[in-house]
Structure formats: C-alpha cells, structure tokens
Image (spheres, rainbow, N blue to C red):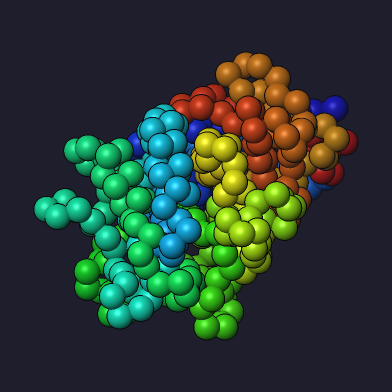
Amino acid sequence: MAKAHHEFKKLISTALACAAISLSSAGCTKQTFGLAPENASFGQKATFITDVDILWVIDTSGSMGPRQAGLAAQLGGFISNLNATRLNYQMAVTTMDMGSAGARGRWIAQSGTPFILKADTPDLLSLLQGRIMAGDQGSVLERGMESVRAALTPPLVDGVNKGFMRKNSLLVVIFLSDENDKSAVFDDVAFLDSIHPPLPFGDKSWVVQFMGVTPDDPSCKTSEWGYSEPGVRYINMAQASGGAAESICDADFGRALTNVNARLKELLVEFPLDRLPNVDTIQVFVNGKKVPKSDTNGWSYVEAKNSIRFHGEAVPGPDASINVDFTPQGAK
C-alpha cells in the first residue's frame, strides 16, 4: 500500500500561548482519483503566528491578600517556562473592582513603568508580581467579566489600554478569585467571540483559565468561617474555551501555572493535513522518534479539522522536525 509522507517543519517566530496557524504546501504530486501515487512525497511548511496576549484579572476583596501572595511567589517558574516557548507574548493586569475607586478595567502599573509587560521588559518578574499583589481593599462585589468587557472595548481599548489585544493573537484571560462572578448577566462566550473572532482553522482565539474555588474541592473555602462559593461562571467560560479551572487552595499555585503553560502549548502545536487519511495508518515522528497515540502524552487526530494535535510531554519543542506518515483515503 502506497504511503503519502508529510513533513512538517515547525517554525516559531519569536519568544506564551495559540495563536493562528497558516499553512502552505509545496511539491505535491498530482493524484489520480482513487489512487495514491507511488512513493508520493509532500512537503508542507507550517508557519505560526505566535502572538499571545495574557490578561490577569485579580480579585482585590478582603480575603485575597494571601491568595495573591501565593500566586506571585510562583510566577518565576511560569515566566521561565513561557520564555522557553519562544512566543511573542505580552501581559496586562487589571482588577475585578468596578467601583468608583477601582481599576474599572484599566491596566494597573507601578509608577513610571509600562502598562503592558513583554519578555524584554526590564524587571518583568518583579513588575508582574507587584501587579498580581494588587491589595485586598477593593470592592466586595467581584465583577470579573464586567472588568474584562470594560478593558477590551471602547473607550479603554482605544485609550489607556490601547496596544494590548492584537489581531490574530491568542487571548488568554486568567481569573484569580475565591468567589463567583457578580457581573451583570450577559453572554460571556458570545462577547469574547465578537471582539476576538475564531482563528483561521476554527478554534476560538481566546481561552479562559480560572484559579479559584472549584466544586470538586470541598475543603477549599471562600472565607475563614467556612463559607464556600465556587466560581461557576468562570468555570463555564474555561470549559467553553478549552481552558482549565484550578483550585485556589492548591498549596503553591505551581500546578495551576504549569497547566496554563501546558494548555497554551497544546493550542499552539497543531498540524493540518492536506488530505484525508485512513486514521488507523497514521504514524507520527518527532525528531525521528515515534510518538504514541495518546490524549495525555502523545498525539490525537482531530477529525473535524483533519489535523494532528499534540498533548502533554509529547508537545514538540521549538524548531522540532515533525513527520506524519499515513495512507490517504481512497488509496488502493
């Protein structure tokens, strides 16, 4: 049985993220209907637009001081892992305080420093840590989604928040809160879809990550007197976008931050195929080593998009050589 051999060269353009993928193919031998040509060889180059915009939305109500400090203490590893991906990322921070004295969707920053943080920003880690530790004197009415809506729409998006949300970027919204959202009711998913349309291959161009009280962690409490309020609205958004919800009561936030990085890499590393395969014949190799088919630490075939997606420890590193062998449908 003849095989069609597909070689993909992953090119990462600069230094988090998913990002849009554009695919160009070259050197394709014309195929007669129903027959795969003998030893057909196809060279395909995948170029990634790897702009990732990360928005941190921080709860500043009275119980949040220790939570903020715990997250800030773990940001060093997060930044190091982010830099290793060589993505073109930038970050901004706002709070959930929509009161008259709150941020109301505006980016917060130390005096004399840029509102938007990038990989080459001097003292990036300390600046981000300071902004995450936004204080615990804010409104007790946490309005995370209203804050996001204000931040990413006029007048702020054309004014003091200008330059953050880029075209064809992956928008990552990370909520930190120990309560559910108290924002006015509106369609959160439709809103984010409207301001940040889907990527070229149909994936959402935004993903929500939540660090808060989750229903599956009954020991995690919103307050010291035992009250518990899971962040259901944030969790629903995370599920709708393929993101994750992590417990705010995790001892050091390390797992939550690691999962943010892992999910970003999964979103960014996906390879469309130029013809339909017989799925049972697919074999995937990274740098010459065969990768198992696995949704945990391997690859999976996404039928809806005719693509190969990598997971976990199998996500290729920068500039990896990826080969996908398969027999096309209709081959005799």
Image coords of residue 123 (percent x, y): 22, 37
Q: Please report the residue visible at 19 percent of the width from the left and 38 percent of the height from the top.
A: 122
Relative to residue 142, is residue 93 depicted above or below?
above
Q: Please report the residue visible at 33 percent of the width from the left and 44 percent of the height from the top.
A: 129
Residue sitting nearer the eye, 35 or 4: 4
Quarter of the rendering occupied by the C terminus = top right
**Image quarter for residue 314?**
top right
Image coords of residue 86 (percent x, y): 39, 34
Residue sitting nearer the eye, 219 or 3: 219
Q: Is residue 48 left or right of residue 220?
A: left
Residue sitting nearer the eye, 108 or 304: 108
Q: Please report the residue visible at 44 percent of the width from the left and 36 percent of the height from the top.
A: 74
Hey, which residue is sitting farthest front in the picture?
A: 225
Quarter of the rendering occupied by the N terminus = top right
Relative to residue 318, is residue 188 depicted above or below?
below
Q: Is residue 244 left or right of residue 217?
A: left
The reply to whether residue 35 is visible in this rendering is no
Q: Please report the residue visible at 51 percent of the width from the left and 30 percent of the height from the top.
A: 9
